[in-house]
Image (cartoon, helix red, strand yellow):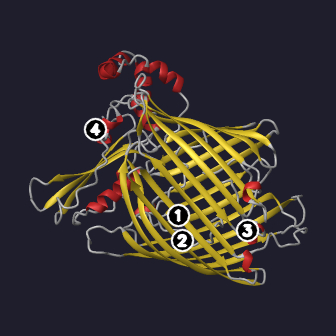
């Protein structure tokens, strides 16, 4: 889990300086605690900054999966849920006559409710023990923003030999997070709450100001996760940017979040109004026009297990899905003679075979935390049609993916091919390939290092340049997020390299994990050769900062520099917007049916 706290860092560094080297840290840490107890003011400060104990002591994490055979046939008699707040105090052990500073700390951070944790468990009291359900529950909880560490363990019942007790230990993350963004002349500040009222719901607000052009931008969102234990996430978001573009989105969805999931579905209702650049045939001029769009998207599906011999674990499924999308333009620009802004309907259906497993590793993207890395294989087919203007265009596509741990590290790759069956055969094909490879950890004198290499290659037909919705860009998070969505083309290539270091030594109980990123990208127009297009680049550095004795014990800082941004032809930089996990790693989850390279 990545927690992006930048405030208090200088103060914390000076405070932690009282703590000595590794072999003496425990004794001096408690001396600081004893010293802070002498005054109410220092005790209050100590209570908000320091943990009662290291996070790994509050809840021990492990990389071993639950045993598949040790408890077979036994019944789950009881499920005990133990939650610990970010300060290191078990919620059940809190004193009813707590001091004012304890009550204030509890108001600032509301602890996760036991019912919230229980709703993420895939097993129930009275069920027969299932090792996969225990692991999947732990994995799903570990992926939640409000969870720092989780451990689900078995306790043999003393009263009977045919039953067991399950203990679920969860350490909360500090969920109230400041948001800071710097990019060129833009500066933004806001707040994010990942565990509203202890329910696991997310609320976010960000206000940005362009002090050069004196313009403002506001974004806000609310997401209710896992409503009533259904694993349905529903939310609403809104945005109004510097040039009065606006967007409102309401959505609800239930994904195939686990190989054990049987059904999934969702819908999205979206309205947006924005100024965009419209390509004009036989001209390099892109006039700016304003459009209004109403988008409705509805999908659903079911997956069932496929067994080959061993039936004790479900890892292979066949998923069947359907999707309908209606994309309507209102108040089309008068100068749009080539129907660039043309409403359409699409109907798609897919069938996919998926083998999905996970291996628990450490020191991939986070320092000393268990991380669930997916691997497996998939193969799927998609068919359907697009109705645009007066034309109905049939479509068919295939996709395949593979991921595996090898002797030299980990490799995952995914390829997709699609074809529109229309009268213009040369303009009907599309293809996409992307993958990521990372090495094993290599020992240097002062650190362990891991390298990441990741390419993305895609081509599309002229259809991708004849519609605003169905166009190819470089503006995704894992590519060049500072680029305008109006920078479009029919072919693209992105090459990425990331180096992650885990420094061997700590300083004042702080552990530093620096990383660097480099990316090159090409986006070509129409019949232009890919490498004759302009070379786009991105360079960045960042660092993960960890201290197990702090409430704000995980900080991630980053700086990314874009030497030249299309249209503006100027340099742009971003501060603290890039995460070191922004790489296209295949999750081997079931994809919603889609046209290859079309934005979902």
The reply to whether the C-beta atoms of the residues labelled 2 and 1 are less than 8 Å apart is: yes
Q: Residue 504 occupies which quadrant of the picture?
A: top left
List the residue tagged with mark 4. 93
Residue 354 in sight here: yes
The reply to whether the C-beta atoms of the residues labelled 3 and 1 are less than 8 Å apart is: no
Q: In this view, does 434 lie above or below 513?
A: below
In three-dimensional space, the C-alpha distance between marks 2 and 4, rounded to whole angstroms, equals 52 Å
Residue 361 on image: x %, y %: 37, 48
Q: What element carries label 2?
A: strand
Image quarter (top left, top right, bottom left or bottom right) of the N terminus: top left
In three-dimensional space, the C-alpha distance between marks 2 and 1, rounded to whole angstroms, equals 7 Å
In three-dimensional space, the C-alpha distance between marks 2 and 3, rounded to whole angstroms, equals 19 Å
Q: Residue 414 carries which label?
A: 1
Instruction: Return the disc, 4 or 1, that comes first in the chain's sequence.
Output: 4
List the residue tagged with mark 3. 464
For the point 74% across and 75% down, the residue is 427
């Amino acid at each position: 889990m990545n927690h992006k706290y930048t405030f208090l860092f200088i103060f914390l560094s000076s405070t932690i300086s009282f703590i000595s080297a590794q072999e003496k840290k425990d004794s001096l840490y408690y001396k600081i605690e004893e010293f802070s107890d002498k005054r109410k003011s220092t005790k209050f400060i100590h209570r908000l900054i320091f943990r009662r104990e290291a996070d790994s002591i509050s809840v021990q994490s492990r990389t071993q999966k639950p045993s598949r055979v040790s408890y077979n046939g036994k019944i789950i008699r009881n499920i005990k849920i133990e939650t610990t707040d970010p300060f290191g105090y078990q919620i059940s052990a809190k004193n009813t006559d707590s001091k004012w500073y304890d009550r204030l700390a509890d108001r600032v951070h509301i602890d996760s409710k036991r019912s919230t944790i229980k709703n993420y468990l895939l097993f129930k009291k009275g069920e027969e023990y299932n090792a996969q359900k225990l692991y999947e529950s732990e994995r799903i909880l570990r992926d939640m923003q409000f969870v720092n560490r989780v451990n689900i363990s078995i306790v043999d019942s003393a009263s009977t030999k045919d039953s067991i007790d399950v203990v679920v230990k969860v350490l909360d993350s500090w969920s109230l997070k400041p948001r800071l963004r710097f990019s060129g002349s833009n500066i933004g500040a806001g707040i994010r709450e990942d565990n509203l009222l202890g329910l696991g719901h997310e609320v976010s607000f960000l206000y940005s100001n362009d002090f050069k052009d004196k313009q403002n931008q506001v974004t806000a969102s609310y997401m209710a996760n896992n409503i009533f234990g259904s694993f349905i996430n529903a939310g609403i978001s809104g945005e109004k940017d510097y040039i009065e573009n606006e967007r409102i989105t309401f959505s609800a969805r239930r994904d195939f979040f686990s190989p054990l999931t049987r059904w999934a579905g969702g819908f999205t209702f979206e309205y947006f109004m924005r100024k965009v650049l419209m390509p004009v045939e036989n001209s390099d001029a892109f006039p700016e026009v304003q459009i209004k769009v109403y988008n409705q998207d509805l999908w659903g599906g079911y997956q069932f297990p496929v067994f080959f011999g061993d039936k004790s674990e479900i890892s292979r499924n066949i998923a069947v899905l359907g999707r309908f999308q209606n994309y309507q333009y209102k108040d089309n620009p008068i100068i749009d003679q080539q129907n660039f802004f043309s409403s359409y309907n699409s109907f798609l259906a897919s069938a996919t075979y998926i083998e999905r497993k996970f291996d628990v590793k450490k020191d991939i993207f986070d320092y000393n935390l268990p991380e669930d890395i997916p691997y497996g294989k998939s193969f799927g087919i998609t068919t359907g049609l697009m109705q645009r203007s007066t034309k109905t265009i049939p479509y068919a596509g295939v996709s395949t993916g593979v991921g595996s741990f090898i002797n030299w590290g980990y490799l995952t790759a995914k390829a997709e091919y699609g074809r529109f069956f229309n009268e213009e055969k040369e303009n009907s094909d599309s293809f996409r390939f992307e993958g990521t490879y990372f090495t094993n950890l290599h020992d240097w004198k002062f650190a362990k290092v891991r390298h990441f290499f990741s390419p993305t290659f895609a081509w599309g037909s002229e259809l991708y340049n004849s519609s605003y919705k169905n166009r190819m860009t470089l503006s995704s998070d894992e590519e060049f997020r500072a680029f305008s969505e109006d920078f479009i083309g029919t072919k693209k290539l992105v090459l990425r390299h990331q180096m992650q270091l885990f420094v061997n030594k700590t300083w004042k109980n702080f552990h530093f994990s620096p990383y660097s990123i480099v990316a090159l990208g090409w986006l070509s127009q129409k019949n232009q050769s890919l490498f004759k297009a302009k070379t786009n680049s991105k360079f960045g550095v960042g660092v993960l900062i960890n201290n197990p004795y702090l409430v704000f014990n995980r900080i991630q800082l980053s700086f990314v520099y874009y030497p030249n941004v299309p249209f503006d032809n100027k340099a742009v930089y971003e501060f603290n917007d890039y995460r070191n996990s922004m790489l296209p790693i295949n999750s081997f989850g079931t994809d919603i049916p889609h046209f290859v390279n079309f934005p979902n």
